[in-house]
Image (tube, rainbow, N blue to C red):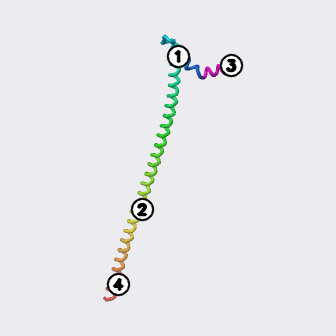
Amino acid sequence: MTSEDVNYLKENLGIPLTLALAEITTVQPKDPIHYLGHWLFKYRYNQEMSDIQTIEINQLCEERDRIARERWHKFIEEEARTAVIDMILRAEEQATRNEWIRIQRELEEEEEHEERLADGATDVFV
């Protein structure tokens, strides 16, 4: 056997074969060869299921993160939209107040002008 063969056996059979032989020693089945074969098939199946489960978990995590990002962007957009609407409403309110102040000043100036005209007219007739 070459060192490559030994490395291959260590990497691919070392752990499962050691675990299987330990269980066979503990259980001591009537047909250890059949038990070993069945145990190795089950080990491989469990490994494949674990790999599939890991892939599915990663996909679900990515999907959850994508959904969370979308919700965050929607939240930020809604907050920005709300802020813009609030700014517009405040600007409209301020413009309305300024317009009322301007109208009030014009009315006061007009009243003062009329009073001056009335005072001037009475001075002329007196």
Q: Which label's residue is closer to the chain start, 1 or 3?
A: 3
Q: Position of residue 64 (x, y in %)?
A: 46, 40
Instruction: Name the residue carrying label 2.
Output: 91
Q: What is the residue that sits farthest to the bottom in this orientation?
A: 125
Q: Amino acid at mark 3?
A: Thr
Q: Please name whichever residue, 44 or 114, is drawn nearer the observer in this view of the structure.
A: 44
Identify the residue at horizontal 42%, vertical 57% (top origin): 85
Q: Amino acid at mark 4?
A: Gly
Label 3: how many Cα within 10 Å (few below 14, some 14–19, many 20+):
few
Q: Quadrant of the C terminus?
A: bottom left
Distance from disc 2 to disc 1, alpha carbons, whole Å, reads: 81 Å
For discs 2 and 1, the disc positioned in front in the rendered view: 1
- Secondary structure at badge 4 equals helix
Q: Amino acid at mark 2?
A: Ala
Any part of residue 10 in sight: yes
Q: Is residue 43 above or below residue 95?
A: above
Instruction: Name the residue carrying label 3.
Output: 2
Q: Position of residue 31 (x, y in %)?
A: 50, 12
Residue range of the region highlighted in magenta in the rendering: 4-11
Q: Is residue 11 above or below residue 88?
A: above
Identify the residue at horizontal 46%, vertical 49% (top origin): 76
Q: Which label's residue is closer to the chain start, 3 or 2?
A: 3
Per the image, is 75 magenta?
no
Q: Amino acid at mark 1?
A: Leu
- Secondary structure at badge 1 equals helix
For discs 1 and 3, the disc positioned in front in the rendered view: 1
Q: Which label's residue is closer to the chain start, 4 or 1?
A: 1
Distance from disc 1 to disc 3, alpha carbons, whole Å, reads: 26 Å
- Secondary structure at badge 2 equals helix
Instruction: Name the residue carrying label 1.
Output: 36
